Image: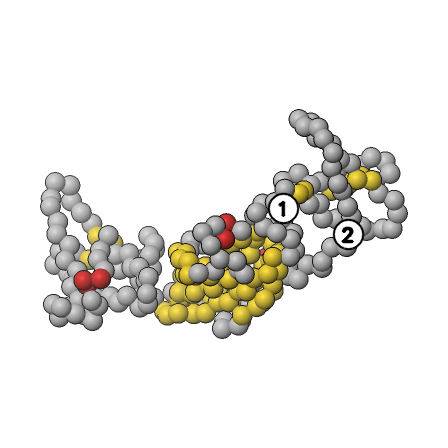
Amino acid sequence: NLLDASGKVLATANGLSSGTSAVMPFTATSAGTYYVEVAASRASGSYTVKAQYGVKDDYGDDAAHATALALGTQVKGALELTSDKDAFKVSAVAGTTYQVDFTLPKGGASWQYLAGVSVTDASQGYVGARVTYDGNKAIMLFEAAKDGDYYLSVAGSWQTSTNTPYTLAINAIAVDDYTANTSTTAHIEPSAPLHGAINFSDDRDWIKVHLDAGRTYVFDLQGSRTGGGTLDTSTTGSY
C-alpha cells in the first residue's frame, strides 16, 4: 500500500501483478513524503521494493476518454501496466459487420491470454464478437445493431508485462442482409423459401421459423450445385 503521513491508504497493489511482482501505480497530486507499506498476512520472507518513474498513459481508459479511431486506420499503443485499459471510439452503421485486428508482439499457444479487446455500444452494453486467431493476431467480427458510437477496450491480464505494445485496426467488411441474433428480419415458412447471402467469410444469418409440436420438418439449404444461389453448400451448412 501507499500511505500518506496520516496513514491513509492512497493506493494498493492488490490484484495488480506482473509475473511474480506486484505493481502499484500512483500519481501524486502534491509534492511531499509518502510511505510504502509492505505486508503479508500469510507469508514471511525477504523482499525488494523500488520506486521508479512510470510511463505516461498513451490512451484514455474509458468511454469518456476514448480516442476516436477511423476505419482503415491502424494505431499503435501499449499497456503500460497490468491494470491499464485503452479505449477507442468508432462510428458504426447499423447492419454493417466490422473486423477488428488486434496484434501483440508475442506468438505461441498462450499469447492471447496476455491481453484482449472487448466491444461495447453507446450505452456500454456488451457486444458479442466472433474471434479467431492467426499467428500473433486476434481477428474479431461484430455487427452493429444500431447507428452510433461503439467502443473498443484493450485490456491486459495478470500475465501482461509492463509496457506491452500492440496494434489495433478496424475495417467495415460488408452490410449484412440478416443479423445473427433474435432481431433478425429473416423469416421462412414451409410454403415460402427465403433467399439470402453469406456476405463474407464467417458470416452467419439467423432465420426465424415457426414449428408446430409433433410435426417433422426438413430444412433444405441450396446453393450453386442446385441452382439456388452461388454459395458452395459443400463447405457450409445450416445449424
| Location of residue 173 in the rendering, given as x and y in whole percent from the top left corner | 39, 69
Crowding at dot 2, Cα within 10 Å, few <14 / some 14-19 / many 20+, comes out as few
Give the CA distance from mark 2 to mark 1: 15 Å
Mark 2 or mark 1, which has the lower sequence index?
Answer: 1
Number of the label disc, if any, that sits on residue 18: 1
**Residue 171 sits in which quadrant?**
bottom left
Q: Quadrant of the N terminus?
A: top right
Number of the label disc, if any, that sits on residue 52: 2
User: Viewed as shown, does residue 233 lie left or right of 138?
Assistant: left
Q: What element carries label 1?
A: strand
Residue at image position (43%, 65%) is 99
Q: Which amino acid does label 1 sit on?
A: Ser
User: Viewed as shown, does residue 230 lie left or right of 125?
Assistant: left
Residue at image position (31%, 68%) is 199
Q: Is residue 137 visible?
A: yes
| Location of residue 125 in the rendering, given as x and y in whole percent from the top left corner | 49, 51
